[in-house]
Image (tube, rainbow, N blue to C red):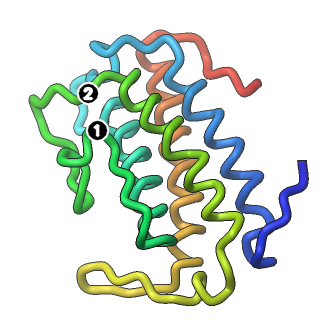
Amino acid sequence: MDVKTKSIRMATIPALYDMQTKFFISALEGISDKDAHSRLETKANHIAWLAGSLVQQRCELACDIDKSTSYKQQADQLFKDNQGIKDGLQYPSLEQFKNDWQEISPILRELLIKATDEQLDKNIEMPGMQFPLFDMITFVTYREANCIGQIALWRRLLGYEAMKYM
């Protein structure tokens, strides 16, 4: 389905966004909350942290695009300010992350489609750096694919069947 974006620079983003919206849910399908916290005796980020960080990323990106958007996931306190994984902490259920994902995704999708060149050129300020919103959007799009791939790998390492792409 072709989506008409306000900015030509955003033309391919909705297609990737829609795929990743579905892939996130598929990657988490059937994983127990116990397994979602397994790190298999490594320092790798577990599934629960990866899922929560992706939800947080979408919430924050929505706020970066439209300052009047104030949606926060239920686990905002665990992830705000780019907090890393915390050893020994019980993260929320995957069901909670999926619910928050499904709530923020249509909001952010609409903001991405309606983003103007003027908005995309505005700088995003982060501690010690700044860059255009468009760069942030493309980075977030890349990171989503990367993290969903990590969750798909964790599925196999934990003995689950491969993620379904359809």
Real-space CA distance between mark 1 and mark 2, rounded to the nearest whole angstrom: 9 Å
Name which residue type carries label 1.
Gln
Residue denoted by label 2: 92
Q: Residue furthest front?
A: 68
Q: Is residue 47 left or right of residue 140?
A: left
Q: What percent of the width, then of the height, locates residue 25?
A: 56, 28
Q: Is residue 159 left or right of residue 88?
A: right
Q: Relative to 147, does residue 133 appear above or below in the rendering? A: below
Q: Is residue 39 left or right of residue 147?
A: left
Q: What percent of the width, then of the height, locates residue 10?
A: 73, 70
Quarter of the image holding residue 108? bottom right
Mark nearest the camera among 1 and 2 is 1
Residue at horizontal 42%, vertical 44%? 55
Q: Is residue 109 left or right of residue 8?
A: left
Front one among 144 and 57? 57
Name which residue type carries label 2.
Pro
Q: Residue furthest left?
A: 88
What number is the disc on residue 74? 1
Disc 2 crowd, CA 10 A, few/some/many (<14, 14-19, 20+): some
Disc 1 crowd, CA 10 A, few/some/many (<14, 14-19, 20+): some
Do the numbered discs 1 and 2 sit on residues whose CB atoms are within 8 Å? yes
- Find numbered disc 1 in the image and state the secondary structure of the residue it sits on: loop
What number is the disc on residue 118? none
Q: What percent of the width, then of the height, locates residue 95?
A: 40, 21
Q: Relative to 75, does residue 124 appear above or below in the rendering? A: below
Quarter of the image holding residue 3? bottom right
Q: What percent of the width, then of the height, locates residue 134?
A: 59, 77
